[in-house]
Image (cartoon, rainbow, N blue to C red):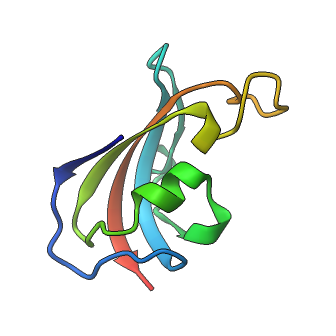
Amino acid sequence: MIEDLIVGDGPEAVAGGTVEVHYVGVEYDTGEEFDSSWNRGESIAFPLRGLIAGWQEGIPGMRVGGRRKLTIPPELAYGPAGGGHRLSGKTLIFVIDLLATR
C-alpha cells in the first residue's frame, strides 16, 4: 500500500533510477524500528533495481520533496518466514523522504 504523506514538487523518481532518501523502517506487527537513516544522521542513495520489490514498486512516481509511507507485505520484502533474513515473513512499513533522483 502506498500513501503520500507529503506530495513533492521536484523531479519524479523513475523505475530503474537511483534515488537519495531518508527513511525509517518498522515492523507492522510490533511497531519495532529496524532501520533508520535519520538515526544514522545521513541520507543514502540507492539504485532502485537493487532494492526489495516493495521499494521498486512504491518509489517510482514519487517526487523530490515528497514523503511516502509504504506498507510492504513479506512477498514484496524479504519473503516468507524461514527465508533466512531476520525480516522474512514480516510486513514492513517504511516512511521515505525523497531527497534527489538521478
Residue toward you, 34 or 15: 15
Q: Where is residue 9 in the image (x, y as percent from the top left)?
A: 14, 74
Q: Position of residue 47 (x, y in %)?
A: 59, 73
21 to the left or right of 2: right
Q: Position of residue 21 (x, y in %)?
A: 42, 63
User: Can you say which quadrant of the picture contains the C terminus?
Assistant: bottom left
Residue toward you, 27 or 99: 27
Compared with residue 86, is residue 15 higher up or lower down, i.e. above or below? below
Q: Residue at 67% of width from left, 24% of height from top?
A: 89
5 to the left or right of 17: left
Q: Residue at 36% of width from left, 40% of height from top?
A: 1
Q: Position of residue 68 (x, y in %)?
A: 29, 51
Furthest residue in direction top, as rendered: 30
13 to the left or right of 33: left
Residue toward you, 19 or 82: 82
Compared with residue 63, is residue 29 higher up or lower down, i.e. above or below? above
Q: Residue at 30% of width from left, 66% of height from top?
A: 62
Furthest residue in direction front, as rendered: 75
Q: Quadrant of residue 83?
A: top right
Q: Residue at 20% of width from left, 79% of height from top?
A: 10
Q: Is residue 48 visible?
A: yes
